[in-house]
Each structure stands twice: as structure tokens, then as C-alpha cells.
Amino acid sequence: MPLTIQQVIQGHEALVTLLKNDKEEKFKIPFHARWVLAENLNRTIPVVEEFTKQHNALVAKYGSKQPDGNFSISDKSKEPVFQMERTNLLNSDSDIESFGAVNVVDFGADNIQIDLLALLIKTGMLSVTELTN
């Protein structure tokens, strides 16, 4: 069963944070794990870009242009319909069946914030099969 667009976006955000922390040397990701996570990131980018495009179209459809050139939904009667369509978009299937996973033990997860770790496990990017040893 394919991942939903929301799952892909959540995974993308977690990957961006994780790889940023690695780049800033807050912790070091082993090479193999970095490779798998970079492949996952490359798979998420088209989905995130397409979602952004469709989301912006929804905002333009239900919103109005502000003086700064951005759109916002100021008509409160349109807000529920916008939210429903946005939720439907987020819950729709992506073209990604699953992410490549890295075992959390091999990953060196002691340095990762718990919320980021949980999100990576939830999206299937980290495997916890060996944690009980």
C-alpha cells in the first residue's frame, strides 16, 4: 500500500532536519545510513513539490490576493471547504510504496532528538528490529 502524501511530507521534513544536523556536525551519520537517507530524500522531493503546487492552487482558489501579493483565505465560509480539500489531498496516496530503512542501532540514534527519531520510525525510515537485544 502506498504511503500517503502526508507521510511522505512528514518523512521529508524529518530527513531535512536530520541531514541538516549531520551537515552542521551536531552528530555524525554513518555513511551507509547517509546514503539510504539521501536516496529517500530524493524520492520525497517530487511529491513535496507537487503537493506544494496543488496546495497553492487550493489557496488561490479559495483565497484572495493580499496587498503583499500572497494569497490568504479571509472568507471564513470558504475555510471548511479548503480544509476538507487539503485534508483529502494529504490523505491521498503518493507514488512511493515505502522508504529505504536504516536500522536504528546502526544509525547511532543516541544523539537524535526523540521526536525526530519517532517520526523517522513512523515513516518507516528507521527500523527498530534489533532494539530489544
Image (cartoon, helix red, strand yellow):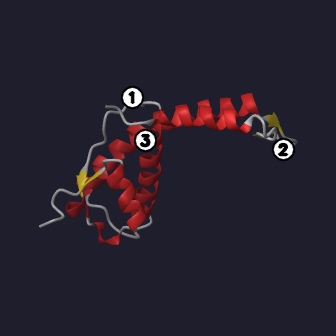
Measured along the vertical axis of the image, is residue 33 above or below residue 70?
Answer: below
Seen as rendered, the residue at the extreme left is 133
Distance Cα–Cα, label 1 vs label 3:
10 Å
The amino acid on which the numbered mark 1 sits, given as a three-letter code, is Asp
The residue wearing badge 2 is 68
User: What residue is disc 1 on?
Assistant: 95
Q: Residue at x 81, y 34 (%)?
A: 64
Q: Depth-wise, is mark 3 or mark 2 nearer the camera?
A: 3
Q: Image check: 49 left or right of 55?
A: left
Q: Quadrant of the N terminus?
A: top left
State which mark lies toward you, 2 or 1. 1
Closer to the chain start, of discs 3 and 2, is: 3
Residue 75 placed where, x, y %? 81, 38
Q: Please state which amino acid type lies under the numbered disc 3.
A: Val
Give the position of the C terminus as an image quadrant: bottom left
Badge 3 is on which residue?
Answer: 8
